[in-house]
Structures are given as structure tokens and as C-alpha cells.
Image (cartoon, grey):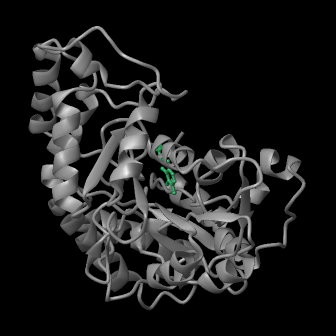
Amino acid sequence: MTEQRIPFVKVQLDDDDIAAVEGVLRSGWLTTASQVKALEEELCAYTGARFVNAVNSATAAMHLCLAAWDLGPGDEVITTPYTFTATANVVLHCGATPVLVDVVDGTANIDPRLVEAAITPKTKAIIPVHIAGEPCDMDALMAMARPRGIKVLEDAAHAIGTLYRGRAIGTVSDAAAFSFYANKTMTTGEGGALATNDAELSARVRRLTLHGMSRDAYNRYGAGGSWRYDIEEFGFKDNLTDIAAALGRAQLVKLERFIEERTRVAQRYFANLRDEEHILLPVFSEENRQPWHLFMIRIKNETSPVQRDDVINQLAERGIATSVHFIPLHYHTAYQKLGRWAKGDFPVAERFFEGEISLPMYPAMTNEEVDEVCQALREILHP
Ligand SMILES: *Cc1c(COP(=O)(O)O)cnc(C)c1O
């Protein structure tokens, strides 16, 4: 196997991250308590959202949100096939029905016109996904959702740090779910959060996060706490640990710097690849701030002498790791078994996927490494 010289992502872990986790380990209190509460407050301050619930994944954040909205059988939730499976899994886990619509070319974000056409009396929610951190057309989505009483939950797994027309993601819709998975823009190893301005939603999510308990374990075991609790409804077990939250707090302090470095890397890719005829570069709008969670290029398979899969293999042979985001949901076995979608149903998403390569992107990536990736791409595309 070729030595991997340039990874696809490199987790940025510094001494302060390690010290933060060590502090929790030495404190003797490992799970949900003061660190989680502090992370929630700091995420409120960072996003401007009134409430943040830190949980153990973005998947959990989305599931809890839909559960708190009482979504169930007969309800429809509109999203796209161009996402990670979690986005639609959580709809199915509630017993509700995912309704998939195609994306816009360029960003691979949900197409608001197709959303409007897919709305039925059963539509309870819309889940737009901010692909690579570039925000969806939220004004258009909110304008069709609000008057009809349809909820909007943003899959903001890529979008911590995104500004949509000057507003932070987390304040734009009914709720937004962030991911702190290991390869996301900031990490807690495993973790996520739901941001909302809705006090009732946040309170219900908090209860559902921990078995439907009347009060959390910290209050039960802390000084002055009582052994008494009540199970008020049947909840889940999705709480974040203090170990993870401490890492998240240390990462959040550095998030703006991470985004600056990612922006530097993105700008260098753009400058380097601007004139490459066989590549389509990411599309983004200057009116937003894109945190560059991913740098997604597309190979023009129709005219390029080398196709996407070969480009990926040849980059790997040179020690350059890449990824592909995303295999459209309806290509997967479990979705095919639902018998609702066929190849060809989402032509924009399918064509986007067929050309897509996510290039190496991480804050510590040097300009020389970016140049090497670009030079390799040019050589591969002009054999
Ligand atoms: C990573 C990701 C998720 C899931 O995040 P977890 O924190 O691992 O649950 C959901 N949606 C998208 C678009 C993602 O990229």
C-alpha cells in the first residue's frame, strides 16, 4: 500500500485540548454535568441561539428534535438524497416518511422549488442540509414553511460557523443540528448539539435525551440533590459526557482560527485550480460565510480524459487521500428495499455524485500540501 502523505482530514488536537480532557478525568465526574452546561452556554454565545442542547451526535440531535415535535406514522418530512444517511434514518426511526427532492446544481443543496412542489397536507417538517457548510436558501424555505405551520430542522453537521446572510446557523429556522464527530470542523470525538430559539422544544429535547426523566443525573447526585425522580415519558439515552464536552469547549475557543485556516486552504485551491478545464470548483455565495467543512470539486466526466474513480485511485497512488460526499441515499440497499425510489429519480444529485471528489481539507494543511494536491490533479487530468 502507498504511504499516505496527505490525509483527507487531520484532527487538530493541541495541548489545551488534552489538558481540558485530563482536567475532567482528574475531577472524578465523567458524565453530563458542568462541562456540558458550559459548552451549551458557550455555543449559545457563539451562535446567538437562545437554547443549545448538547447531545452525543448530530444524529441524536435530529432524532430528538423530530421526536419532540411528535412526528410519527403518516407524517412526511422533506429532505434530499444528497446527504449522509443519518438525515433520513431519523425520520424513519420516528415512523414518519422521508420525502426526497432533488438538489440545485453547484451547491448540491435542497432545491426550494422542488420542496414547494412536494408539500402535502401531511408535510410536518423540512430538513435542509448545508452541504460543505454552504447554507441552503433558508429565506425561501422559511417563507414556504412558516405560513403552513411546517417545521424546519437544519442538518447543520457541516455548518458550525456558517453565516447565512449575516445570521449564524442556529438562529435562522426552528432548530439546527451540529455535529462534533471526529472529522467535523470542531470535534468532541462523538457529539452534537441542537440549537433553537424555542424554549419548549429545548426543554422537551432535554427530557427525551435522558430517558424522559424529570431531572438530570447531575441534579440527582449533586450536593443538595435528591434520589427522587420521575419518568414523565419514554425517552432515549443520548446525553453527552463531560469528557467530550471539555474537548468541545477547548475546540470552540479555536473554531474561528480553524475556519480562517480552512478559508486559506480553500482560497489556495481556487487560485490553483481556476483554469483547470476538467474540474468544476465549489459554488458559494459571497453574501454568506462558508466555513469550508469540505472542499468538493467535480470531475467533468463527459469531457475529461480520466474519470472520477480513476482520479481518486491515482491520487491515492501518490499518497493523497480523498473522499466522496455523498453516495445518494436511494443508491443504498436499505433505501432500495423501501421500493420508493429508482436510479434516475434525482438527476442533479446523481450527476453531482458521479463527478464529486472531496479534496484534503484541514486547518494544519500547508500551502505546499495544497499545491501538491493541485499539481497531482493537473498531471492526472492531462495524461
Ligand atoms: C456527519 C454528518 C451527520 C451525522 O453526524 P453525527 O454527529 O455523526 O451523528 C449528519 N448529517 C451530515 C450531512 C453529516 O455529514
Residue farthest to the right, as pictured: 339
Question: Residue 194 appears at what percent x and percent y?
Answer: 38, 50
Task: Work out whether residue 77 or residue 114 is closer to the camera in this orientation and state it.
Answer: 77
The image shows residue 245 at horizontal and vertical percentages of 24, 35
- Report if residue 295 is visible in the image: yes
Q: Is residue 179 visible?
A: no
Q: Position of residue 319 (x, y in %)?
A: 45, 51
Q: Which residue is drawn at the image coordinates 48% and 76% (left, top)?
A: 136
How many numbered discs? Answer: 0
4 relative to 324 in the view: left or right: left
Q: Residue furthest top?
A: 227
Name above or below for residue 210 compared with residue 86: above
Residue 275, above or below 159 = below
Left or right: residue 124 compared with residue 145: right
Q: Where does the N terminus fall, quadrant-wise?
A: top right
Q: To which quarter of the image does residue 125 belong?
A: bottom right
Question: Residue 276, position in %: x, y?
Answer: 48, 87
Work out whether residue 85 or residue 139 is closer to the camera in this orientation and state it.
139
Work out whether 224 lies above or below 309.
above
- Point out the image quarter for the C terminus: bottom right
379 with respect to 11 (left or right) = right
Q: Residue at x 27, y 59 (%)?
A: 365
Report the residue at 72% width, 66% height from top.
100
